[in-house]
Image (cartoon, rainbow, N blue to C red):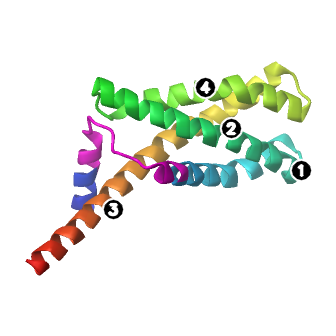
Amino acid sequence: MIIALVATYHEVRSMTQPLPRSQRERIGHALAFETIAVLICAPAMAWFMDKPLVHLGALTLMFSTVAMLWNMLFNYLFDRAQGRLGFERGLWARVSHALLFEAGLILVLVPLAAWWLSIGLLEALLLDIVLILFFLPYTLAFNWIYDVLRARWLARREAQVDDAVCRGA
C-alpha cells in the first residue's frame, strides 16, 4: 500500500501535462475544497473575532462562493498554461499556484470583509492575511492530495477496464 502511494506520488509529481478535467469534476473539486474550508474557518473565525457563528458563517459562505468561482476559473487557466508551457507540477508550480490564487482573492475579499464586519480596509487586510496563512498550506495540501487520489482512482479504473477486456478476449 505504501509503495503504491509513493509510486502514485511520483507519477503525479512528475506530471508535465495537465490531466483532462470535465466541468463536473471541476465543480466537485471546488465544492469539496470550499466545504472543508468553511467547516474549519467559520467556527475558528467566530471564536477568534468573538462574533456570532451565524454572522461569521455567512461571511465565510460569501467568501466561499467567491473563492469557488475563482477556483474553477483559475484552475482552468492554470491547466491551460501548463498545457501550453509544459511545466512540471512539482512543489514550485504548486506554490506558485497557491500564491497566485490567493492574490486574486485578496482583490475581492478584503473590501467584502470590511463592509460585512464594519471594519476598515487595513483590518480586513489583516484578517485576510490570517486567512491566507491558513489557506496557502491548505490549498497546497488539498490539491496535492486530490491529484494523488485522482491518479490512484484513474489507475484503478484503467486496471478494471483492462481486466474486463482480458476476460472478454
Secondary structure beneath dot 1 equals: loop
In the depicted view, which residue is nearer to us: 151 or 84?
84
Residue 94 appears anywhere in the view = no
Residue 12 covered by magenta stretch: yes
Query: What's the residue at 24%, 46% (across, down)?
Result: 10
Identify the mark nearer the N-term, 3 or 1: 1
- Residue 52, label in figure: 1
Secondary structure beneath dot 2 equals: helix
Query: What's the residue at 43%, 49% (across, down)?
Result: 22
From the image, tell me which residue sits under label 2. 66
Residue 66's place in the image compared with 87, above or below, is below
For mark 4, does the 10 Å Cα neighbourhood hold few (<14), some (14 to 19), or many (20 or more) residues? some
Q: Quadrant of the N terminus?
A: bottom left
Please indicate whether residue 88 sits to the left or right of residue 28 in the image: left
Q: CA distance from mark 3 to mark 1?
A: 40 Å
Query: What's the residue at 23%, 60% (across, down)?
Result: 4
Q: CA distance from mark 3 to mark 2?
A: 29 Å
Identify the mark nearer the N-term, 4 or 2: 2
From the image, tell me which residue sits under label 4. 104
Identify the mark nearer the N-term, 4 or 1: 1
State yes or no: discs 4 and 2 in contact (Cβ < 8 Å).
Answer: no
Residue 47's place in the image compared with 159, above or below, is above
Mark nearer the viewer, 3 or 1: 3
Identify the mark nearer the N-term, 3 or 2: 2
From the image, tell me which residue sits under label 3. 153
Query: What's the residue at 43%, 51% (across, down)?
Result: 146
